[in-house]
Image (tube, rainbow, N blue to C red):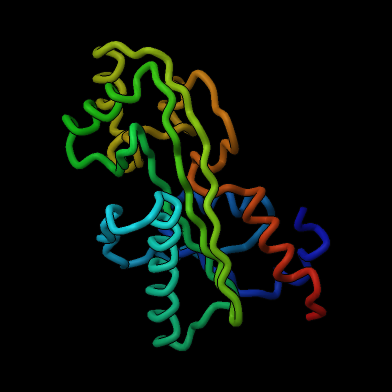
Amino acid sequence: MLQPIKHVLKRKKIILASGSPRRRELVENIGLTVELCPSLFEEDLDPKTFSSFSAFVEETALQKVLEVETRLKSQAMAPDVLIGADTMVTLDGEMFGKPTSEKEAFDMLKSLSGRSHTVYTGVVVKTLDKVVKFTEKTNVVFGKLDDEQIKGYIATGEPMDKAGGYGIQGVGGTFVERVEGDYFTVVGLPLYRLCSVLYELFKDKNL
């Protein structure tokens, strides 16, 4: 999708406001050269103050981007394009973030077992003169898990830095019976929408 504007994007300094190697790999797999700059934003927004889960993840992604932009500008390293994202897992109207303990990871996975849940990823793309925000959501159906399977997975350590306590691109993917929507939304960066936004932003640029 980005082939017609690759020559434009190659001249841009593109920063991913994230420390996620998964997101970096996704972006580099589509041919973009990016630099990682993990945001220092506290991620302390209260989801209860937002009208929707989409509004929450978009605002969190925006604050990540703004923090990185401010920091880089102070170092005279302002980027041409900043991309930020935030992913969350929801079930029965509740948000599942990254588990803070093995017990919390167990409880999360036990809740997800045998059920469908929804993953939201909010994305912000900021150029020198525009800010584009969007959210993609995908339903994920887990198969039925017994306690030993959950404990065995937690022992791998994989759940502890993942929203909802699992990584679909890793061992956690073996729990997933099916995905209804964009798989990459669950990984943490919906590629189709991201590429569509970048194409619209840069298709008319001559430089």
In the rendered image, the vertical position of residue 29 relative to residue 4, given as above or below? above
Q: Position of residue 6 (x, y in %)?
A: 76, 64
Q: Quadrant of the C terminus?
A: bottom right
Q: Position of residue 197 (x, y in %)?
A: 66, 61
Q: Residue at x 29, y 60 (%)?
A: 43
In the rendered image, the vertical position of residue 120 relative to residue 61, given as above or below? above
Residue extending furthest front? 51
In the rendered image, the vertical position of residue 147 relative to residue 56, given as above or below? above
Q: Position of residue 86 (x, y in %)?
A: 42, 53
Q: Residue at x 55, y 27 (%)?
A: 179
How many discs mark residues in the rendered view?
0
Relative depth, front residue between 192 and 29: 192
| Quadrant in which residue 68 is drawn | bottom left
Q: Residue at x 57, y 29 (%)?
A: 180
Relative depth, front residue between 99 and 27: 99
Left or right relative to 89: residue 169: right
| Quadrant in which residue 126 is drawn | bottom right
| Quadrant in which residue 62 is drawn | bottom left
Q: Position of residue 171 (x, y in %)?
A: 42, 26
In the rendered image, the vertical position of residue 66 relative to residue 119, given as above or below? below
Left or right relative to 204: residue 131: left
Left or right relative to 96: residue 17: right
